[in-house]
Image (cartoon, grey):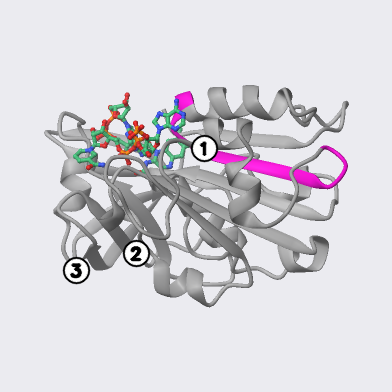
């Protein structure tokens, strides 16, 4: 594998555990929604992890959105990087959470938990979703309201933005979890559009338990995983 020697331009801290790294000097070709491995050399070993690209492909400054997993080998160190520090970036982005994988429909649903928001911010800053879907619903589920990040950017997008805050009451956000709100109709009511196999395509990203539970809820509504040989409605990417 080839590594590009990137340099940190900025490390923005949204909370004590959430950060966004902007990295220059690592030119990449990729599709919006893909991820790339980034790495630091720790104790003589290169420690690499997959991170989704937040920036759209036309923007040469790479952006990554991360959470500190306190016991994790890499994320606490990424959170401490400062402007000017080195960050290795693999030269081969990859991943199937990309719009060309999905057939056209009326509504695109983008369902995320935590840092799973990242790839959708890249996709939503390209022209393709607006060309192919009449309605776009961006859903972000977090534990605490302060984790509803990138709100200024999202406010400028032509999307219906629905948030979940699961561990404290928060005006303007739904309580609980995405799968239950699919089951009981609260998600559709909040978005103001119907969720059906005829009208909808769904991309899911983040916590693997959410992906599993939300996929089951969607399947009970008649939506099924998309495969190239058997076109369907759902594509997903698990972060762990
Ligand atoms: C395709 C792909 C794309 C990814 N994109 C991102 C991204 O854009 N931003 C990001 O922060 N992480 C992303 N991840 C996760 C990332 O690769 C690392 O696992 C994460 O940064 C933690 O690294 P670590 O070495 O500190 O701990 P690890 O040893 O990698 O993870 C330890 C544990 O932390 C938990 N965990 C890992 N990642 C997350 C997370 N994102 N949110 C909550 N809990 C987590 C899991 O329980 C995991 O078992 C992605 C993973 C994959 C497979
Ligand atoms: N977020 C923090 O305050 C915080 C602080 C320190 C460290 N961390 C680290 O980050 C990790 C978690 O990060 P995170 O909060 O971004 O991610 P997360 O645990 O995936 O939580 C994000 C959202 O996903 C929801 N969720 C969890 N399981 C689900 C399921 N099966 N179906 C549907 N929704 C589900 C959560 O709801 P519930 O609340 O109902 O679970 C929450 O609303 C921790 O393991 C820890 O290592 C996080």
Report if residue 155 is visible in the image.
Answer: yes
What whole-number distance in Å separates the C-alpha atoms at marks 1 and 3?
36 Å
Magenta residues, start to end: 197-209
SS type, badge 3: loop
Q: Eyeballing the image, is 21 above or below 222?
A: below
Q: Verify whether residue 99 appears in magenta.
A: no
The furthest residue to the bottom: 156
- Taking the spot 58% from the left edge, 43% from the top edge, the residue there is 186
- Closer to the chain start, of discs 2 and 3, is 2
Is the CB–ligand 2 distance for label 1 below 8 Å?
A: yes
Judged left or right of residue 226, residue 28 is: left
- Taking the spot 45% from the left edge, 48% from the top edge, the residue there is 174
Residue holding disc 3: 83
Judged left or right of residue 146, residue 155 is: right
Q: Verify whether residue 200 appears in magenta.
A: yes
Judged left or right of residue 54, residue 57 is: right
Q: Position of residue 94 (x, y in %)?
A: 58, 42
Q: Position of residue 109 (x, y in %)?
A: 66, 49
Q: Position of residue 24 (x, y in %)?
A: 36, 68
Residue holding disc 1: 178
Disc 2 vs disc 1: Cβ atoms closer than 8 Å? Answer: no
- Closer to the chain start, of discs 2 and 1, is 2
């Amino acid at each position: 594998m080839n590594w590009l020697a990137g340099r940190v331009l900025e490390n923005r801290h949204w909370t004590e555990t959430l950060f966004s790294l902007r990295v220059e000097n690592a030119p990449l070709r990729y599709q919006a929604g893909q991820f790339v491995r980034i790495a630091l050399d720790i104790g003589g070993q290169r420690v690499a992890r997959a991170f989704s690209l937040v920036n759209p492909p036309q923007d040469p400054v790479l952006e990554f959105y991360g959470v500190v997993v306190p016991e994790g080998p890499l994320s606490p160190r990424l959170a401490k990087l400062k402007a000017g520090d080195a960050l290795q970036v693999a030269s081969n982005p990859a991943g199937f959470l990309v719009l060309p994988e999905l057939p056209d429909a009326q509504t695109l649903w983008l369902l995320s938990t935590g840092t799973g928001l990242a790839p959708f911010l890249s996709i939503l800053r390209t022209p393709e979703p607006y060309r192919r879907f009449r309605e776009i619903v961006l859903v972000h589920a977090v534990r605490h309201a302060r984790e509803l990040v990138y709100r200024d950017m999202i406010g400028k997008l032509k999307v219906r933005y629905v948030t979940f805050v699961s561990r404290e009451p928060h005006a303007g956000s739904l309580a609980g979890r995405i799968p239950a709100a699919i089951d009981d109709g609260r998600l559709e009511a909040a978005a103001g559009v119907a969720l059906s196999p005829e009208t909808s395509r769904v991309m899911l990203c983040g916590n693997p338990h959410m992906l599993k539970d939300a996929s089951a809820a969607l399947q009970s509504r008649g939506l099924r995983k998309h495969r190239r040989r058997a076109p369907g409605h759902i594509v997903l990417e698990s972060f762990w």
